């Protein structure tokens, strides 16, 4: 996996040789982004089986890495179901099947992202700017991206668009990752600080906002990188459509509302320091929730691989799941 903590200054790859290394890579955000975390977890489970480690310990270790992105738990459950179905089979056969399944999760994720992109492309206004937050691109998935997949597909349709990327304090996924990824693709991109979003949403320049998601509750409330909620409110205030692009594996229909989504709290040092340099006085109190929840009334539509859902989300999200 590419080490996302070192981008954009260095393009370095990390090889995980056991499930603990995969768990560490997820925890330390060497790999991040909901679908990418899911793919990594599936591979981690396969590695654990190959090592002959206790299966429940492998699953628990991977599940305890990050709490908010439901794709992590979705992928572990998928691997657990397969493992249970192989009970009593010869060890070599179990290993081969688990490795095949993990690779399949990765292959499917790329296809899903392409379908999300293609389903969302027509929603992107031509000759306008798309605002995005965090990184919901190829780096956050097995490839192509969710929110950035929509942008890529809109460009493939021939639309003349450019992108505004919020820098996304405190971890700077927008500045470090989205800016890097879109630049690699030659997609015209402008970096703004998070507090500039209102200014530009008011300017008339932004045709739509497209973001990813870490968990979507049954009522359409969306957990995504902290700061997404502010962008959504500003978008609605200024009459700009706010789209969420996510695979069905990001749905958590067991939760009736976003208030029930666990929000990861990250270290204070991410807020007080930038690249190891203190930007705040010592011993200052800090809050660092990694995600916030955008109530569904701010969400114009949710773009998935199976189609586009609109309010009432209680009905439309369930219909997408059941029509699978
Ligand atoms: O903390 P991160 O970088 O893992 O958070 C990532 C996000 O919030 C993304 O927007 C989300 O996972 C969607 S990725 C396609």
Image (cartoon, grey):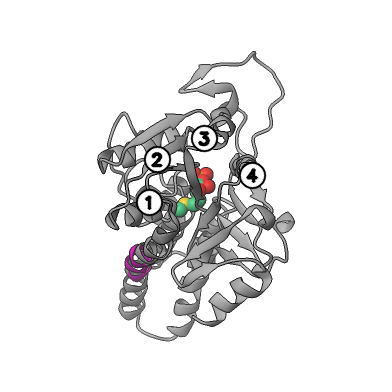
Q: Which residue is mark 1?
A: 151
Q: Secondary structure at mark 3?
A: loop
Tell me the tag on residue 229. 4
Q: Secondary structure at mark 1?
A: helix
Image coords of residue 271 (percent x, y)? 59, 27
Image coords of residue 26 (percent x, y)? 46, 48
Judge: label 3 CB < 8 Å from ligand 1.
Answer: no
Tell me the tag on residue 121. none
Who is closer to the viewer here, 166 or 77? 166
> Which mark is first along the chain, 3 or 4?
3
Image coords of residue 215 (percent x, y)? 59, 58
Q: Which residue is mark 2?
A: 163
Magenta-colored segment: predominant secondary structure: helix
Q: Which residue is mark 3?
A: 168
Evaluate if marks 3 and 1 touch, with contact meaning CB atoms under 8 Å apart.
no
- Rendered view: 300 above or below 236: below
> How far is the residue under mark 3 from the one under mark 2?
14 Å
Camera-near label (4 vs 2) is 2
Evaluate if marks 4 and 1 touch, with contact meaning CB atoms under 8 Å apart.
no
> Which mark is first along the chain, 2 or 1?
1
């Amino acid at each position: 996996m590419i080490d996302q903590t070192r981008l954009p200054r260095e393009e370095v790859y990390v090889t995980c040789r056991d499930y603990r290394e995969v768990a560490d890579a997820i925890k330390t955000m060497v790999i991040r982004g909901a679908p990418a975390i899911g793919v990594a977890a599936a591979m981690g489970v396969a590695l654990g089986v190959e090592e002959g480690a206790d299966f429940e310990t492998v699953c628990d270790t991977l599940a305890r890495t990050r709490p908010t992105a439901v794709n992590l738990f979705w992928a572990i459950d998928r691997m657990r179901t397969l493992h249970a179905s192989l009970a009593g089979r010869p060890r070599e056969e179990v290993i081969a099947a688990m490795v095949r399944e993990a690779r399949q999760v990765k292959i499917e994720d790329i296809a899903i992202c392409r379908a999300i992109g293609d389903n969302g492309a027509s929603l992107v206004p031509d000759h306008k700017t798309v605002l995005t937050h965090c990184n919901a691109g190829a780096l956050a998935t097995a490839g192509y991206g969710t929110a950035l997949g929509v942008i890529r597909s809109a460009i493939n349709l021939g639309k003349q668009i450019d992108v505004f990327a919020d820098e996304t304090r405190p971890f700077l996924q927008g500045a470090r990752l989205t800016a890097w990824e879109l630049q690699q693709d030659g997609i015209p991109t402008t970096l703004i600080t998070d507090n500039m979003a209102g200014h530009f949403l008011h300017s008339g320049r932004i045709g739509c906002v497209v973001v990813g998601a870490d968990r979507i509750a049954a009522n359409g409330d969306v957990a995504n990188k902290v700061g997404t909620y502010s962008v959504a409110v500003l978008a609605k205030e200024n009459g700009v459509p706010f789209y969420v692009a996510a695979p069905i594996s990001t749905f958590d229909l067991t939760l009736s509302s976003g208030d029930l989504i666990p929000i990861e709290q990250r270290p204070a040092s991410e807020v007080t320091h930038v690249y190891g340099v203190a930007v705040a006085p010592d011993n200052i109190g800090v809050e660092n929730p990694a995600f916030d929840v955008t109530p569904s009334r701010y969400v114009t539509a949710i773009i998935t691989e199976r189609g586009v859902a609109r309010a009432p989300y209680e009905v439309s999200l369930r219909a997408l799941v059941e029509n699978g």
